[in-house]
């Protein structure tokens, strides 16, 4: 069902690498907007998983990043751009279980190689682009109709 | 079954958001990998884990879990308890191991 909104609803968040304490803020804001709009529970669940994993990847791997979302009557578009090391082999990074996270991050229960697969699994369109030494950009779209 | 029905059986000490004891529990999810919980747990489940850092509050909140049970009476830092209270996430600790805690919850849910 298309949303009855006149203008797209947007959100923009700065994410600082290493700042685990604020993880989930962008996802939580997006979730609340979607709840207010009475979006279907399953779509909210998928959008939340995809956004949170994207936030975590910036926190774990990058110096900083930005997450933007746009809710249109028919779609949720999420874009995450980071200033990080970049991903050398995207195909390998997309493999469930593959991770380059350091030991201390794994001890927290992150870095199990599920982040990128979770993002892909929970979005309808998933695009990833990465440049070594510059950063990674991910675009995800979830259809509302 | 309500969260509070587990209190005695698991010797729970409720650390945050007592209101959550009224939550219905639809099942349980046992994992210390946060992406696993994020991806595979379902709303209304109780989460049994040994993780005690800040991100457990965000995961439980985002997934609408019924609450978190921390095993082996692991100490939960004060800032995490404060965050959980603010976000209305119920955290309880049990002296039991993950195996025992999960076993008892499983039995009670049958």
Image: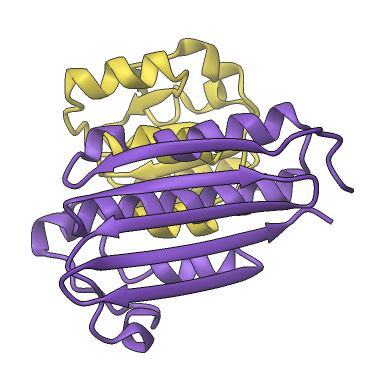
Residue B46 relative to residue B83: left or right:
right
Number of callouts: 0
Q: As drawn, which residue projects farthest toward the front?
A: A7
Residue A130 lies, in percent from the top left, at 32, 75
Which quarter of the figure has residue A99?
Answer: bottom left
Q: Residue at x 25, y 66 (%)?
A: A135
Residue A125 relative to residue A49: left or right:
right
Q: As drawn, which residue projects farthest toward the right?
A: A1
Q: Is residue B72 above or below residue A113?
A: above
In this picture the colour scheme is by chain
Residue B104 lies, in percent from the top left, at 47, 43
Q: Is residue B32 visible?
A: no
Q: Is residue A105 above or below residue A32?
A: below
Residue A52 lies, in percent from the top left, at 44, 48
Residue A71 lies, in percent from the top left, at 67, 43
Which image quadrant: the C terminus of chain A?
Answer: bottom right
Viewer-closest of B88 and A47: A47
Q: Residue at x 61, y 17 (%)?
A: B22
Q: Residue at x 32, y 38 (%)?
A: A14
Q: Is residue A93 visible?
A: yes
Please identify which colour was used for chain B in the image.
yellow
Residue A63 relative to residue A75: left or right:
left
Viewer-closest of A47 and B92: A47
Viewer-closest of A78 and A43: A78
Chain with colour purple in the figure: A
């Amino acid at each position: 069902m298309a949303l009855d909104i006149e203008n797209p609803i947007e959100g923009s968040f700065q994410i600082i690498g290493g700042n685990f304490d604020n993880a989930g803020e962008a996802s939580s804001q997006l979730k609340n907007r979607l709840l207010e709009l009475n979006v279907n529970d399953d779509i909210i669940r998928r959008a939340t998983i995809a956004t949170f994993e994207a936030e975590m990847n910036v926190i774990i791997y990058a110096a900083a990043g930005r997450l933007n979302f746009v809710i249109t009557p028919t779609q949720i578009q999420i874009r995450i751009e980071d200033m990080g090391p970049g991903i050398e082999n995207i195909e390998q990074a997309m493999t469930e279980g593959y991770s380059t996270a350091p030991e201390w991050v794994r001890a927290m229960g992150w870095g199990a190689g599920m982040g990128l697969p979770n993002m892909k699994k929970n979005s309808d369109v998933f695009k990833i682009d990465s440049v070594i030494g510059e950063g990674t950009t991910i675009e995800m779209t979830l259809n509302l109709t | 079954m309500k969260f509070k029905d587990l209190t005695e059986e698991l010797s729970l000490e409720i650390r945050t958001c007592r209101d959550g004891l009224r939550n219905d529990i639809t099942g349980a999810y046992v994992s210390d990998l946060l992406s696993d919980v994020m991806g595979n747990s379902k709303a209304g489940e109780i989460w049994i884990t040994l993780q005690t850092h800040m991100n457990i509050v965000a995961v439980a909140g985002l997934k609408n879990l019924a609450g978190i049970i921390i095993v082996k009476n692991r100490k939960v830092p004060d800032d995490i308890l404060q965050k959980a209270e603010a976000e209305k996430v119920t955290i309880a600790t049990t002296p039991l191991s993950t195996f025992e805690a999960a076993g008892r919850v499983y039995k009670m849910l049958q």
